[in-house]
Image: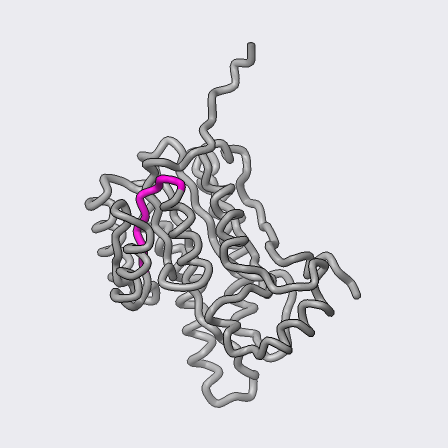
């Protein structure tokens, strides 16, 4: 008989914070976690939108307005979530903004600073705020959502590329720092996914891009990213940390 501990494949009863959860991948993740029995803190800028998602998730979900670019707001909201739910087991850093901006653009500096504030600095602040509570969990999990733009680059997108590349490095650093405490930290790099950020891309252009660039020849759905996130936060996923996982339909694998 094996002496390996019985590691659960259930997140039922676990408390999960998801940033940027009012739409897209965040919403899909909140709904999936709730369907698996987790208690979900739905956070985003718009409280009304968060409340709508929390309603979809059921009675064990609550909505919180949160601007992840605001350090004080992060500390206050995370503390409130821990108080309301009695702890924190899972943190999904998903909040993001579109930051496409050519170098020569007059507004480049503002776009740059906002991109790093929302998609990189906020991640470490969320982790630091949640850490005292994660340390009390027997299966603490952190998942950072980056992008394939953190593995390659699109012209004119340097603020976004820099922020998302920073997330992959932050993930590795946190994994090393928190590994001795059995807190896992992993990163997902979505490719072309149907979200509010890609809504402006005409359907015809989506089809052309996907057929040219992805192995699966299509855009992905937010739920497909959410299922990978779920896999990483299971108590059974106890020996996966520091991983950078593309969920991109084979975009990074395809040369031509």
- For image coordinates 29% across by 49% down, the residue present is 58
Residue at the far right: name it: 256
Q: Position of residue 87 (x, y in %)?
A: 27, 40
- For image coordinates 24% across by 43% down, the residue present is 85
The C terminus - image quarter: bottom right
The N terminus - image quarter: top right
Q: Is residue 189 above or below residue 136?
A: below
Q: Position of residue 43 (x, y in %)?
A: 31, 58
- For image coordinates 75% across by 60% down, the residue present is 254
Q: Which residues are magenta?
A: 36-43
Q: Is residue 45 above or below residue 137?
A: below
The main secondary structure of the magenta stretch is strand
Magenta region includes residue 40: yes
Foreground residue, 4 or 204? 204
Q: How is the image coloured?
A: one colour
Do we see residue 71 in this rendering? no
Q: In which quadrant of the rendered view does residue 209 lie?
A: bottom right
Foreground residue, 69 or 173? 69
Do we see residue 15 in this rendering? yes
């Amino acid at each position: 008989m094996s002496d390996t501990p019985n590691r659960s494949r259930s997140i039922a009863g676990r408390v999960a914070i998801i940033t940027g959860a009012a739409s897209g991948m965040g919403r899909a993740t909140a709904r999936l976690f709730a369907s698996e029995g987790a208690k979900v803190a739905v956070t985003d800028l718009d409280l009304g939108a968060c409340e709508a998602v929390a309603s979809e998730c059921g009675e064990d979900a609550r909505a919180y307005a949160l601007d992840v670019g605001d350090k004080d707001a992060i500390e206050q909201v995370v503390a409130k979530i821990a108080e309301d739910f009695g702890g924190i087991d899972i943190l999904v850093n998903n909040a993001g903004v579109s930051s496409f901006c050519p170098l020569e653009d007059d507004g480049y500096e503002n776009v740059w600073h906002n991109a790093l504030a929302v998609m990189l600095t906020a991640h470490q602040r969320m982790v630091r705020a949640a850490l005292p509570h994660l340390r009390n969990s027997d299966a603490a999990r952190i998942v950072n959502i980056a992008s394939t733009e953190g593995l390659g680059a699109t012209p004119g997108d340097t603020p976004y590329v820099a922020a998302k590349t920073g997330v992959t490095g932050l993930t590795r650093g946190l994994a090393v720092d928190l590994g001795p405490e059995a807190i896992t930290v992993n990163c997902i790099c979505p490719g072309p996914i149907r979200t509010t950020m890609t809504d402006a891309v005409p359907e015809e252009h989506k089809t052309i891009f996907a057929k040219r660039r992805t192995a699966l020849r299509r855009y992905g759905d937010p739920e497909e990213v959410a299922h990978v996130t779920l896999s990483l936060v299971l108590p059974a996923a106890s020996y996966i940390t520091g991983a950078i996982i593309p969920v991109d339909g084979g975009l990074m694998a395809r040369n031509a």
